[in-house]
Image (tube, rainbow, N blue to C red):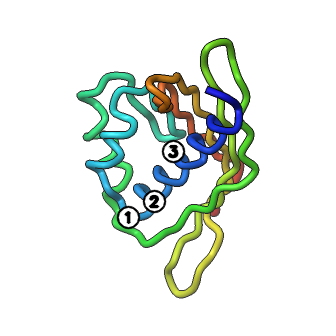
Amino acid sequence: MNPTEARHLSANLLHSYTEMADSQDIDAAVALLGDAEVRFPSGGFDRPEDARPFFERIWSAHTTHRHDVTNLIVQPEGHRWRAQAHYVRWMFEDEPAVHTLGLYDLLLTTTHNALIVRRFTVARQWSRA
């Protein structure tokens, strides 16, 4: 896979994830990340059977929010790809407000002209108290 394809597919994966998070689509998140090692500040999982309970827990509040992704960088790491991007999480209560600034870090492998998420890490740089 060439770098342009890897960047395009990485962007699609990240934006797909943020759409899942924003709509709290647990089934889609499990399908995308269930086989990956996933780390969030609030925990994570590394076994497929732990994916659903994890997403059910972190998305149980049913708050209205939106993620914006920027500054995507995709680089080769041997036979794998590493994608890193900034994110902004907006909360919608009385009016939209920035709630969290952070980083996504993905380790991806190539299979049949597709990228598979092997590791997905979410790091918060700032969060509203």
Identify the element where label 1 is drawn.
helix
Residue 65 image position (x, y, % from top left): 49, 69
Q: Is residue 64 above or below residue 51?
A: below
Q: CA distance from mark 1 to mark 3?
A: 15 Å
- Whole-percent x, y for residue 32 in the image: 38, 39
Q: Amino acid at mark 1?
A: Ser
> Which is more N-terminal, label 3 or label 2?
3
Q: Is residue 40 above or below residue 64?
A: above
Amino acid type, label 2: Glu
Q: Residue at x 42, y 27 (%)?
A: 36
Q: Marks 2 and 3, Cα distance to the nearest angstrom? A: 10 Å
Q: Residues within 10 Å of mark 2 (few under 14, many from 20)?
A: some
Pointer 1 and pointer 3: residues touching (CB < 8 Å)? Answer: no
For label 1, count other residues whose C-alpha is less than 10 Å away and answer few (under 14), some (14-19) or many (20+). some
- Crowdedness of circle 3 by 10 Å Cα count: few (<14), some, many (20+)? some
> Is residue 54 visible to us here?
yes
Secondary structure of the residue carrying tag 2 is helix
Residue ID at (65%, 35%): 83
Image quadrant where residue 112 sits: top left
Q: Amino acid at mark 3?
A: Leu
- Give the x, y percent position of residue 16: 47, 52
Q: Which residue corresponds to mark 3?
A: 13
Front residue of 13 and 45: 13
Residue where numbered disc 1 is placed = 23
Asked if the residue at tag 1 contacts the one at tag 2, i.e. Cβ–Cβ closer than 8 Å, the answer is yes
